[in-house]
Image (tube, rainbow, N blue to C red):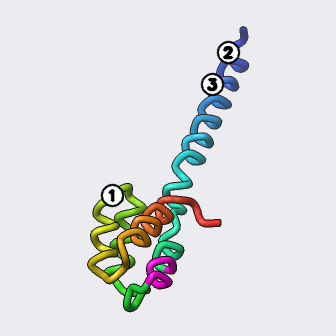
Amino acid sequence: MRTSTRVAGVLAGLALSLTLGGALAAPAAQADIPACAQMAGQAGAAGSTGDAVTAACRLGVSGDLQGCVSGLTAAGVPGGAANGACRLAAHEPR
C-alpha cells in the first residue's frame, strides 16, 4: 500500500471519529431546561421562570435527578410533577 493512500485513510478515520464524537456529545448540550421550567410552572411553582426553578432544572440536565427534584419541590412544585420535569430536563428538545 502506498504511503499517500495510508495517510488518506488515517485522516479519513480521524475525521470520522471527531464527527461521531461531536454527535454523541451534542444531545447533552441540547437538554431541555425551558420544558422543565414550563412543566414546573404548570404544576404550580410560583414564578416558574425564577432562578430557583432554572437552577433545579440545570441539575436535572447534569444528571442529578434527586437534586433537581429537591430544588423544584422547595420552589413549590408537587413531588410527582417535579420528578417528571426533572426527567424532561435531561432529554433533547422537541
Residue occupied by mark 1: 64
Query: Along the line of sight, which residue is nearer the eye, 32 or 21?
Result: 32
Q: Which amino acid lies under the numbered mark 2 shown in the image of this protein?
A: Thr
Where disc 1 sits, the SS reads loop
Residue occupied by mark 2: 3
Where disc 3 sits, the SS reads helix
Please tell me whether mark 3 or mark 1 is closer to you in this view: 1
Please tell me whether mark 3 or mark 2 is closer to you in this view: 3
Q: Residue furthest bottom?
A: 47
Q: Which amino acid lies under the numbered mark 3 shown in the image of this protein?
A: Val
Extent of the magenta region: 38-43
In the displayed structure image, the side of residue 5 where residue 93 appears, left or right: left
Mark 3 surroundings within 10 Å by alpha-carbon count, few (fewer than 14), some (14 through 19), many (20 or more): few
Mark 1 surroundings within 10 Å by alpha-carbon count, few (fewer than 14), some (14 through 19), many (20 or more): some
> Which residue occupies 42% across, 61% down?
61
Please tell me whether mark 1 or mark 2 is closer to you in this view: 1
User: Percent x, y for residue 52?
Assistant: 31, 81
Q: CA distance from mark 1 to mark 2?
A: 49 Å
State if disc 1 and disc 3 touch (CB < 8 Å).
Answer: no
Where disc 2 sits, the SS reads helix
In the displayed structure image, the side of residue 76 where residue 32 appears, left or right: right
Which callout, 1 or 2, points at the residue further toward the start of the chain?
Answer: 2
User: Percent x, y for residue 3?
Assistant: 67, 15
Residue occupied by mark 3: 10
In the displayed structure image, the side of residue 61 where residue 26 appears, left or right: right
User: Percent x, y for residue 83?
Assistant: 40, 65
State which quadrant residue 55 falls in: bottom left
Which callout, 3 or 2, points at the residue further toward the start of the chain?
Answer: 2
Dominant secondary structure of the residues highlighted in magenta in the image: helix
